[in-house]
Image (cartoon, grey):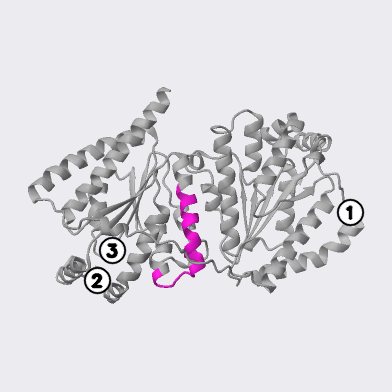
Amino acid sequence: MPDSNKRKNGGSEDRTETSKAEFKAATPNLRVDLVNAQYRLKDAAFSVIILLAGPDRIGCEQVVDRLHEWMDGRYLDTWFADKPSDEEASRPRLWRLWRNMPAKGRTGVMVGATLTDIIGERLGGNSRNGDGALSRLIEHFTALDRLLLADGTVVLKFWLDIPAKAMKKRLKDFAENNAPYVEDLDYVILKHYKAAQPIISELLTRTGVQLPWLEIDGRDERARDLQIARKVLEAIESRLDKAPAVAHEPGISEPVPSHLDAVDLGVSLAYTDYRESIERLQGRLHGLSLEMRRQGLGVVLAFEGWDAAGKGGVIRRIAHAMSARDCKVMPIAAPTDEELAHHYLWRFWRRLPRDGHMRIFDRSWYGRVLVERVEKLAQESEWRRAYDEINDFENQLLEHGHLVLKFWLHIDPDEQLKRFKAREQTPYKKYKITADDYRNREQWPAYIEALNEMVEHTSKPAAPWHLIAANDKRWARVKVLEILCDSLEAALSQGKKKKSD
């Protein structure tokens, strides 16, 4: 735990020095051991993440160069958290971190981890919407640590510290040599060095709850590099030799209400009313989508539902009303090998829309608590903790300013069977029917249980579940479009109000 008393003058009180002879003697065996650990890691079912952050940003760059010298660069994925690009700034703050997560069997080196930027923002009086936003961001970091630990990832967090006097000399030396390492943020931190110490202590404490930071004195480069490399080797070898204990979480004891029973499947809409409504709503959606683009409002739509519930028909009516540049449909099938090598949320994080764009997910991250739960593709401990992981994921979208809408299209078993038979007789729909569709009908009660728990634990005021009666396709299409248009209108009106304030 960081000690703020040690930060009065900056830097760590304990200093380790390594002579050239000691460094030269320790290096050969350490390099061999690191490479061997990498080769063993290649076939492992986990990844390794090395976070490097702190005031000694030059030191962070030097450590990365050293790791690439001592380890096999083919199995190292290095990412520098530089100033966010326009593309990165138009998505939730942790999007770029998720985007660079290493696959299982690989080691990811992440430099900056956005914390150094947070310090610079606070020192400059620009904390991106104040302390409340910062607290929420720290909560997301903590949730991410918890998620990675539960997924079996080895995470090492190094905070490279250096006293102000040594930092000033290092910056001067590197600036004189036109080193690309030196950035404006380094001088901001140096200028406000004493004021930064309590901020650093607070951040390290609050973001080190699940995975504590290891503070490294950066003054002696040889000692620094040996200390970090040994810690990395120790962590990889320890994890390879001993798998972490799997936490078996207790089941949810509270009774869950039957949310689906409240859906009236008897509602219907006459064809003439449907044609008038759908044309009016598509015209309205087209106009709202143009304003969505102008205001930079990102929109995420998640569609779930029974097989043959009509998701595709609803999605086509939405996409048809919008420009292809603004709206993209993401069909979600069984994960690829690349996707299976990452946490299940990874493939959804990387597909999030930019501000001003819409992404429609035809099936979504809720597969973890639905099909993966029912088909036992995920352990109980995995799908139970997914409720919290999904809620944190969606909260980050909402806090960034995205509109999040979630739809479940509900039909009864008789209607589903009727549609299956009709599909078998329709040439362009025959491909949609497989033996699995009929087999899944046997799991109907298990899906009902999973669905009610999903709604109970992941429906929230800012992103509720919309349970749509879909026995009548026309009714379902109009209802979804009404909800979408009303929600877009409200969000855009709120955006205009904020700008005027």
Q: Position of residue 162 (x, y in %)?
A: 79, 41
Which residue lies most toward the front here? 254
Q: Position of residue 11 (x, y in %)?
A: 81, 41
Nearest to N terminus: mark 3 or mark 2? 3
Q: Amino acid at mark 3?
A: Trp
For label 2, the residue is 433
Q: Amino acid at mark 2?
A: Ile
Q: Marks 1 and 2, Cα distance to the nearest angstrom?
A: 68 Å
Q: Marks 3 and 1, Cα distance to the nearest angstrom?
A: 64 Å
Q: Nearer the viewer, residue 336 or 209?
A: 209
For label 3, the residue is 306
221 above or below 431?
A: above
Quadrant assignment for the C terminus: top left
**Does 390 appear in magenta?**
yes
Residue 353 visible, this orientation: yes
**Does 336 appear in magenta?**
no
Nearest to N terminus: mark 1 or mark 2? 1
Q: Position of residue 464 (x, y in %)?
A: 36, 48
Residue at image coords 89%, 51%: 17
**SS assignment at label 1:** loop
Q: Marks 3 and 2, Cα distance to the nearest angstrom?
A: 13 Å
**SS assignment at label 2:** loop
Q: Amino acid at mark 1?
A: Thr
Q: Position of residue 92 (x, y in %)?
A: 49, 43
Residue 18, numbered label: 1
